């Protein structure tokens, strides 16, 4: 067994956590909306057609913000197709996923669903085929109370109160050649800036997210981010980052995804800070990691021009869940700059929640680490000073074998420690010292591990990959010994004793 130590001191706080780092994403993609969150003929559907079994699973996952309606979808979407009487809404071709979009679910249905799911919306506007003017009309429709053409239209449609969406994304992945009407950095920067001006004129209380690089592999990374920020810095509040990982044959590389995500975040932070200095600005740009996850993009197939055909319904393994846990530690550890993050996505399309259109809900393995961190990783994040051996990876060289994050919530007086052990052969004895938090009592300890890293959950075996209780030894009120199984994810929850 290997040995490692972790010291966390209450004087070394990273930052308060913005709960929106535990966000998610619903796109009009495959079965995310239709037969995912919305299925009027389902036995659990409520009077608005929302699946109650899905709402229950989403509530349990605790996602304080959900991005909508895309994603690639938004770049060809006319939001006016999805409002007004359902029988007169048009059926359209969706160029992003080669699907048929019936528009039976639109912005008002999303607002209703979000309320029921205890979450708020992060709304993306179309900067592909769409114009700055159309984006302005959407903010007017959603956020202005009454007395203008679009706000009165919303009232006519039965929504007397404005939806008051706070966060708006200026397009999606506009650096991608796959995007409907993608743009060069200069063209996007100008379009985003002019749209930002209109949106904030319409509602000065909103927050805006400019599109950053859609991955580290983009040829334009990170100059795209610099160009966009140089043009938009005073007008926007966040720059976005997107990052997906998939297992390509090397387990050590895959489990080290947390290390790569951290590097991506550091580069975007540095780029934003360069622009801040160049512009002599005293505003610090925050980051919105509004798409991240494991995604088996290589396996993806789309059937042309079908409605609600399954797309990217990845079945996640134990190894995928470990990677998701590791990525969450990077997000928490960067919470001084990452103020929003969305696991992409929420239901059916590359998602922790899977539905059967003629049956129930299945929680994939990735549901569990996300639910734990989203539930207990609240309050403030603290630096974890770690001493552990490194592992050799093919892609990143030597990488720490453990990924850790620690949070303490003054409200609940709970401290949570999250640890990924990426050692494939060895258990690790971790000695944990929690300094200056006062005496603590261990109240919950759970681990996700197993001999088969490819094990998955299914409707027949839904509990194949779920967290189990594990042993943690208390040495004193502030010192504990954790035995971390090889290739495992562990959560230890403590409560401060008064
Ligand atoms: O989340 C799936 C897709 O991934 C989104 O539509 C797009 O923004 C990204 O490429």
Image: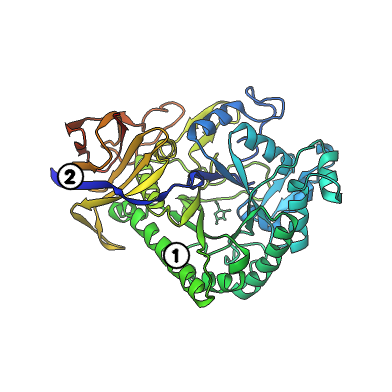
At which x and y percent is residue 209? 59, 58
Element on which disc 1 rests: helix
Q: Considering the image in quadrants, where does the C terminus appear?
A: top left
Q: Is residue 264 above or below residue 389?
A: below
Q: Is residue 141 above or below residue 354?
A: below
Q: Which residue is mark 2?
A: 426
- Describe residue 456's horizontal placement relative to residue 342 as left or right: left
Is any atom of residue 94 visible in this view?
A: yes
At which x and y percent is residue 431? 17, 42
Q: Residue at x 35, y 53 (%)?
A: 258
At which x and y percent is residue 485? 22, 39
Q: How many marks?
A: 2
| Residue sticking out furthest to the front | 498
Q: Is residue 240 above or below residue 141?
A: below
Identify the disc placed on residue 404.
none
Is any atom of residue 424 visible in this view?
A: no
Identify the disc placed on residue 269.
1
Disc number lying in front (1 or 2): 1
Q: Residue at x 42, y 67 (%)?
A: 267
Q: Quadrant of ligand 1?
A: bottom right
């Amino acid at each position: 067994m290997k040995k490692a130590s972790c010291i966390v001191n209450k004087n070394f706080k990273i930052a308060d956590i913005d709960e929106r780092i535990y966000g998610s994403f619903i796109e009009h993609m495959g079965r995310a909306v239709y037969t995912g969150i919305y299925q009027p003929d389902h036995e659990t559907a409520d009077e608005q057609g929302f699946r109650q079994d899905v709402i229950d699973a989403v509530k349990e996952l605790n996602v304080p913000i959900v991005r909508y309606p895309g994603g690639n979808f938004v770049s060809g979407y006319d939001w006016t197709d999805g409002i007004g009487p359902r029988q007169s809404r048009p059926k359209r071709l969706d160029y992003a996923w080669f699907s048929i979009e019936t528009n039976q679910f639109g912005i008002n249905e999303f607002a209703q669903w979000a309320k029921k799911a205890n979450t708020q919306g992060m709304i993306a506007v179309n900067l592909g085929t769409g114009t700055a003017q159309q984006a302005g009309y959407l903010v007017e429709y959603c956020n202005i109370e009454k007395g203008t053409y679009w706000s009165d239209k919303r009232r006519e449609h039965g929504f007397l109160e404005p939806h008051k969406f706070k966060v708006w994304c200026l397009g999606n992945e506009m650096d991608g050649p796959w995007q409907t009407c993608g743009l060069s950095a200069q063209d996007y920067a100008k379009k985003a800036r002019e749209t930002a001006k209109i949106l904030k004129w319409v509602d000065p209380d909103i927050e805006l997210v400019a599109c950053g690089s859609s991955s580290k592999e983009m040829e334009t990374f990170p100059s795209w981010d610099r160009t966009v920020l140089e043009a938009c810095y005073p007008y926007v509040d966040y720059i976005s980052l997107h990052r997906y990982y998939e297992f390509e044959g090397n387990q050590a590389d895959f489990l080290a995804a947390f290390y790569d995500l951290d590097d991506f975040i550091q580069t975007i932070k540095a780029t934003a800070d360069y622009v801040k200095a160049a512009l002599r600005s005293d505003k610090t740009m925050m980051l919105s990691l509004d798409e991240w996850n494991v995604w088996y993009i290589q396996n993806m197939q789309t059937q042309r021009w079908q409605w609600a055909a399954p797309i990217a319904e990845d079945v996640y393994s134990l190894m995928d869940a470990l990677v998701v846990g590791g990525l969450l530690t990077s997000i928490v550890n960067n919470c001084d700059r990452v103020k929003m993050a969305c696991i992409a996505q929420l239901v059916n399309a590359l998602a922790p929640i899977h539905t059967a259109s003629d049956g129930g809900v299945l929680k994939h393995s990735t549901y569990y680490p996300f639910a734990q961190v989203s539930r207990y990783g609240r309050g403030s994040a603290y630096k974890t000073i770690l001493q552990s051996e490194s592992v050799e990876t093919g892609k990143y060289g030597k990488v720490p074998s453990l990924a850790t994050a620690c949070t303490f919530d003054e409200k609940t007086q709970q401290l949570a420690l999250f640890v990924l052990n990426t050692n494939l052969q060895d258990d690790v004895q971790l000695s944990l010292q929690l300094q200056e938090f006062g005496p603590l009592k261990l109240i919950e300890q759970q681990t996700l591990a197993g001999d088969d890293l490819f094990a998955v959950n299914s409707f027949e075996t839904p509990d194949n990959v779920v967290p189990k209780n594990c042993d943690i030894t208390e040495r004193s009120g502030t010192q504990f010994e954790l035995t971390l199984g090889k290739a495992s994810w562990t959560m230890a929850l403590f409560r401060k004793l008064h």
